[in-house]
Amino acid sequence: MEPGPAAVAAWVAAALLEALDAGTLLGLATGCTMEPVYAALADRWAALPARDRARLARRWRSFNLDEYVGLAPADPRSFHAFMDRHLVSPLGLAAARVRLPDGAAAAPQAEADRYGAELAADGGVGLQILGLGLNGHVGFNEPPCGPEAPCRCLDLSPATRRQNAAAFGGDPGAVPAQAITLGMAEILAAERILLVVTGPAKAGILRRVLLERPSAELPASWLQSHPAATVVADRAAASWLES
Ligand code: GLP
């Protein structure tokens, strides 16, 4: 298979299904990179016998990384709505099994504390999938960010608001100024991590994340110290490995 985004998506979808089958708590992400992953998962899901689908749906437990502050779950631009469109509806899951922080909570930091505590009470993440921000963020852990940063409410950087503007009519100013995100602490505590990176635009940042000394300026670089973190990249994102 051509090592493009579709091959990456198929591989990650298979890993998610296998982990789910083993009763693993899943850590999920949103963003363009994840759309083909959830599409591949939905295809595999649809091909399963109804009995297996029902068993896996009962077993489903997941926590998303992040949510925009100020967007209610029903807002089509929220990550809640993204998960509904790409995962909950296509797979027919009970929405309550796919957890995200509540972006509309009156006190966002209190909501972040509650969400982090809920994840801890569930035993932490077994398999965490991550996209990669162009500025080296994972989740919404914007630089500078140390490895011990916990689940919290934080300001989004201008670079991230630009990167995510497409869902907001192309206007970075319309992107919420804050988000709630699991911290590097919860991410690094996952038993296993898949950093999913596709497309030529991510080649430069992926190279830095893997080759530079871990630092707060590049939050994803902390993954270098994780004992079971794997990069799943397509040829375009990993082209620099071949030169
Ligand atoms: C976003 C999200 C991350 C996502 C990353 C990459 O801002 N908060 O969870 O993985 O940035 O996004 P994309 O896959 O659209 O490039």
Image (spheres, rainbow, N blue to C red):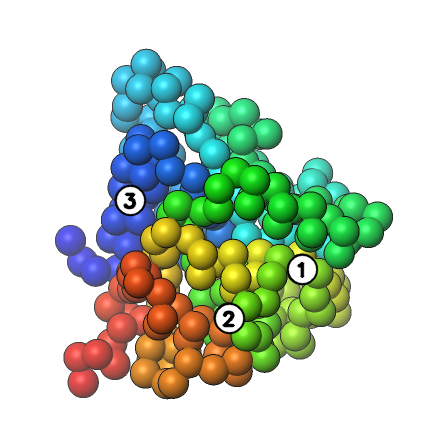
Q: Which residue is mark 1?
A: 152
Comes first in the chain, label 3 or label 2: 3
Q: Which residue is mark 2?
A: 147
Comes first in the chain, label 1 or label 3: 3
Labelled pair 1, 3 in contact (Cβ < 8 Å): no
Q: Three-letter amino acid code at disc 3?
A: Ala
Q: How far across and down, in percent of the image, does residue 89 sit?
A: 51, 30
Classify 10 Å Cα crowding around label 3: few (below 14), some (14-19), many (20 and above): some
Which residue is at 33% across, 77% downward?
A: 210
Asked whether 225 or 62 is in front, the reply is: 225
Q: Three-letter amino acid code at disc 1?
A: Arg
Q: Three-letter amino acid code at disc 2?
A: Pro
SS at circle 2: loop
Q: Is residue 32 left or right of residue 207?
A: right
190 relative to 58, above or below: below
Q: Find the distance from the CA under tag 1 to the CA under tag 2.
A: 13 Å
| Marking on residue 15 | 3
Labelled pair 3, 2 in contact (Cβ < 8 Å): no
